[in-house]
């Protein structure tokens, strides 16, 4: 993905929301300062012990923010590349990026496949630091605005007829879906809008049984939806996971599902 051109710079944002990490740090620092001001040793100890968890969480989120950032470890770009590299598509026709955020995968598809037309959809909920306007700016800065469009839509209820797209991609979106059948329902929607012969490549926390159950059952569900040649690859098997990100709540349960309609 090209970072600069005469029209400006793309800004894809960060999966770690600054206001959340600042909230944890603020609580931790406030408790630590309050402890320092207390004269009673026991009270001081209690406050300092209470300060440790929010400070720890805030510092860990700060580390993740730096690791994901383009000015840091660029981990987000590496994860987007995993999807693009494993999408066995010839680039002819129309592709859909579900949960596009700031347009990273949609724009990446348009840059990689010069003849492709791409649609990116998202709800752009208020608690995320993304927007449709940001997507449009990024597409213009990347020089692909004529081949990419962005629409507001839920992953659980895509506003497209059956068999509309030649390729469907997504990255770390389905686990966030709460409506319309949840994560599995959204996966079924993604398959529904794929044309016969179309390519499918999505990335999410597929190894988290609380979300998806057994992997075998999940893949059988996708086959029942009409997806063929279905395969799941653990993210950890596709390359090293950065230090501190191997936990189940970060990237340890992540995987990529590919298939053909």
Image: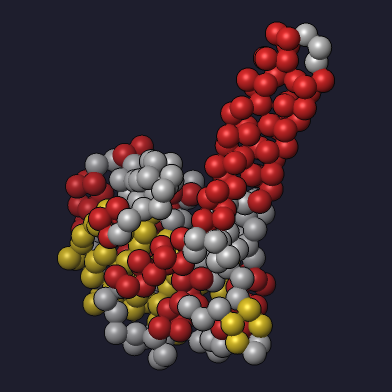
Exactly how many numbered labels are in the figure?
A: 0
Quadrant containing the C terminus in the rendered view:
bottom left
Residue 87 visible (yes or no): yes
Place of residue 155 in the rendered image (x, y in percent of width and height, measured from the top left): 47, 59
Q: Residue at x 46, y 67 (%)?
A: 77
Residue, x 78% and y 8% (percent of image)?
Answer: 40
Name the one closer to the observer, 74 or 229.
Answer: 74
* Residue that sits furthest to the left in the current view: 229
Residue placed at 57% from the left, 45% from the top? 61
Q: Residue, x 25% and y 55% (percent of image)?
A: 237
- Residue 180 position in % (x across, y down): 45, 50
Compared to residue 243, the image places residue 79 above or below, namely: below
Find residue 116 and report its horizontal and vertical position in percent.
41, 86
Query: Which percent across, then down, holds residue 250?
Result: 43, 46
Q: Nearer the viewer, residue 165 or 103?
A: 103
Q: Nearer the viewer, residue 175 or 37?
A: 37
State whether residue 213 is above or below residue 2: above
* Residue 145 visible here: no
């Amino acid at each position: 993905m090209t970072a600069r051109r005469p029209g400006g710079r793309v800004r894809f944002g960060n999966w770690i929301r600054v206001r959340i990490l600042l909230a944890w740090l603020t609580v931790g620092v406030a408790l630590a300062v309050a402890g320092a001001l207390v004269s009673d040793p026991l009270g001081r100890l209690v406050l300092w012990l209470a300060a440790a968890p929010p400070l720890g969480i805030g510092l860990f989120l700060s580390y993740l923010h730096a690791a994901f950032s383009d000015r840091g470890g660029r981990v987000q770009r590496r994860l987007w590349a995993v999807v693009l590299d494993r999408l066995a598509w010839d680039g002819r026709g129309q592709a859909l990026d579900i949960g596009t955020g700031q347009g990273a995968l949609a724009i990446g598809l348009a840059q990689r496949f010069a003849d492709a037309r791409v649609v990116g959809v998202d709800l752009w909920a208020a608690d995320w630091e993304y927007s449709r306007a940001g997507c449009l700016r990024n597409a213009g800065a990347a020089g692909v605005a004529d081949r990419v469009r962005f629409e507001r839509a839920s992953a659980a209820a895509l506003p497209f007829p059956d068999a509309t797209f030649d390729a469907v991609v997504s990255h770390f979106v389905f686990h966030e879906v709460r409506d319309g059948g949840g994560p599995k329902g959204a996966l079924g929607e993604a398959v529904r809008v794929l044309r016969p012969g179309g390519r499918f490549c999505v990335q999410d926390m597929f190894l988290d049984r609380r979300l998806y159950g057994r992997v075998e059952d999940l893949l059988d569900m996708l086959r029942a939806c009409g997806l063929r040649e279905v395969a799941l690859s653990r993210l950890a098997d596709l390359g090293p996971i950065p230090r501190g990100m191997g936990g189940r709540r970060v990237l340890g349960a992540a995987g990529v599902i590919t298939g053909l309609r």
